[in-house]
Amino acid sequence: MKNKIIIGAVLFILSLASAYAQDINASITASFEKNFAGATNIRWTPCPKKISLAQFGYMGKAWLAYFDHQGKLVSSGRRLTIHELPVVVQNGLRFKKQLFENKYGAIATGTIYEMLTDNITEYYIPLQNHKIRFMIAVQSNGTVIVKSKKKLSDQPKSPEGVLARQN
């Protein structure tokens, strides 16, 4: 009985892996190899609208790249620190962050990615505190675009499935 369960589980996992492997077709992998020869630690993730995300190491940095189902590179970018941003981008970020902090209090900066899409470079920067979460894109000229804004609950979430003990 145990063997049948184990074999069933293995077959299920293999079928999922096979289905996923079909999403990352030969044209996508060929395009990836052409654009990022020498990349390491490649992880593929399917995304909505038949887009595939590759996360990998390249030229000493963490990178990501989005490909459509035909293998066309849609967008790619690398992780940067705040100190690696161009000065004009740092200034745009600093100005927008100060505006947000005046309204919402101290805000932390998350992982920054420099993204290239259709020969346009933007810097994607998440900003968050306990009240609000923003995703901003700072263009090369310092212009800031708010891509998303989400208010967060002030109430801490209680763990689900945990019952309080009564003494």
Image (cartoon, rainbow, N blue to C red):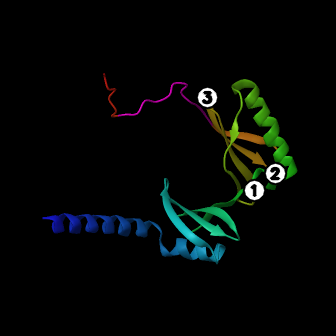
Residue type at mark 3: give it.
Lys
Closer to the N terminus: mark 1 or mark 3? 1
Q: Nearer the viewer, residue 111 or 167?
A: 167
Q: Are marks 3 and 2 in contact (CB under 8 Å)?
A: no
Residue 76 is covered by the magenta coloring: no
Circle count: 3
Closer to the N terminus: mark 3 or mark 2? 3
Disc 2 target residue: 140
Q: Are marks 2 and 1 in contact (CB under 8 Å)?
A: yes
Disc 1 target residue: 120
How packed mark 2 is, by other alpha carbons closer than 10 Å (few <14, some 14-19, many 20 or more), is some
Q: State the SS at label 3.
A: loop
The C terminus lies in quadrant = top left
Q: Tell me what residue is drawn at x 61 percent, y 31 percent.
A: 130
Q: State the SS at label 2.
A: loop
- Left or right of residue 109: residue 65: left
Q: Is residue 20 above or below residue 85?
A: below
- Magenta portion: prevailing SS class: loop
Q: Position of residue 110 (x, y in %)?
A: 67, 45
Q: Position of residue 74 (x, y in %)?
A: 62, 61
Chain part drawn in magenta: 149-160
Q: Tell me what residue is drawn at x 49 percent, y 75 percent.
A: 26
Disc 3 target residue: 131
Q: Are marks 1 and 3 in contact (CB under 8 Å)?
A: no
